[in-house]
Amino acid sequence: MDSDPYKKMAAERAVESIESGMIVGLGTGSTALLAVRRIGELIHAGELKDILGVPTSAAIEEEAKRMRIRLTTLADHPVVDLTIDGADEVAPNLDLIKGGGGALLREKIVAQASEREIIIVDESKLSPTLGANHAVPIEVVQFGWLPEKRFLEAMGADVTLRRAKAGSPFVTDQGNMILDADFGPLDDPLEVACVLEERAAIVTHGLFLGLASAVVVAGEGGVRELWAEGDR
């Protein structure tokens, strides 16, 4: 199934939530990229004005510049009105696994700084339980990646050091490495998150718990919106 038309539908629906004058977090990934391009189109058409974007990766920063979206930083605008981003896996309670694109650290920082976080996905990303269909990306400092790999394996995960296309270790915008830890279905994602956050070499992990305000899902039946409790 070609999911690109569904990704475009979800992106366009999410962008409808943006209003002129907003500080907007610009997510990373193939679906979020479509939202960035749609924002640029609406700015050029004069339908959105005075938008400032906070990019979550160097790649998205370059695309936003290409689309002539004015950019800012969290140093100048520490509160983001709305962030639109993608996800690798979405649980029924709107908890997420993110980080497949390698930008999880900046994505999580921007998400935590946002008043609202709208996630856009095609329906293949919906899952009954986090971890059922996707490994958990874990960003680690290069100095300590191997001890952390061993620690994650001791937790029961099947762990792979992420590599770039050329075969060398993938390095994030912040100069870190990523371990993809396949725990299988997670009975208690919060407990796993708490354990990971105790480890010195783990910078952050791809469990995004309680951060999504809404998830826009597109598929054969059209577009629908899933809302976190109290956010609708």
Image (cartoon, helix red, strand yellow):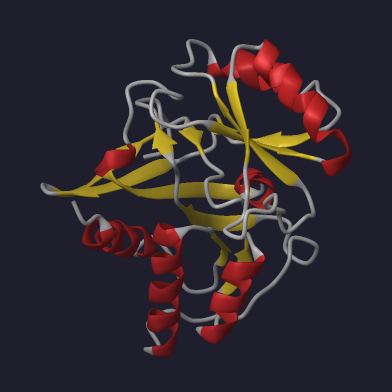
The picture places residue 231, in percent across and down from the top left corner, at 42, 38
- Quarter placement of the C terminus: top left
Q: Is residue 116 left or right of residue 6?
A: right
Can residue 53 be spotted in the picture? no
Can residue 115 be spotted in the picture? yes
The picture places residue 97, in percent across and down from the top left corner, at 50, 35
The one of 101 and 108 positioned closer to us in this rendering: 101
The picture places residue 222, in percent across and down from the top left corner, at 14, 51
The residue drawn where x is 54% and y is 18% is 189
The picture places residue 88, in percent across and down from the top left corner, at 44, 41
The residue drawn where x is 83% and y is 32% is 201
Q: Which of the 4 image quadrants contains residue 146?
A: top right
- Above or below, 125 against 185 in this view is below
Q: Is residue 150 left or right of residue 41?
A: right
Q: Which of the 4 image quadrants contains residue 155?
A: top right
Instruction: Specify the farthest residue to the left.
Output: 221
Q: Which of the 4 image quadrants contains residue 40?
A: bottom left
- Above or below, 39 against 145 in this view is below
The residue drawn where x is 66% and y is 17% is 153
The one of 162 and 81 positioned closer to us in this rendering: 162
Q: How many marks?
A: 0
Instruction: Specify the farthest residue to the front.
Output: 167
The residue drawn where x is 46% and y is 18% is 184
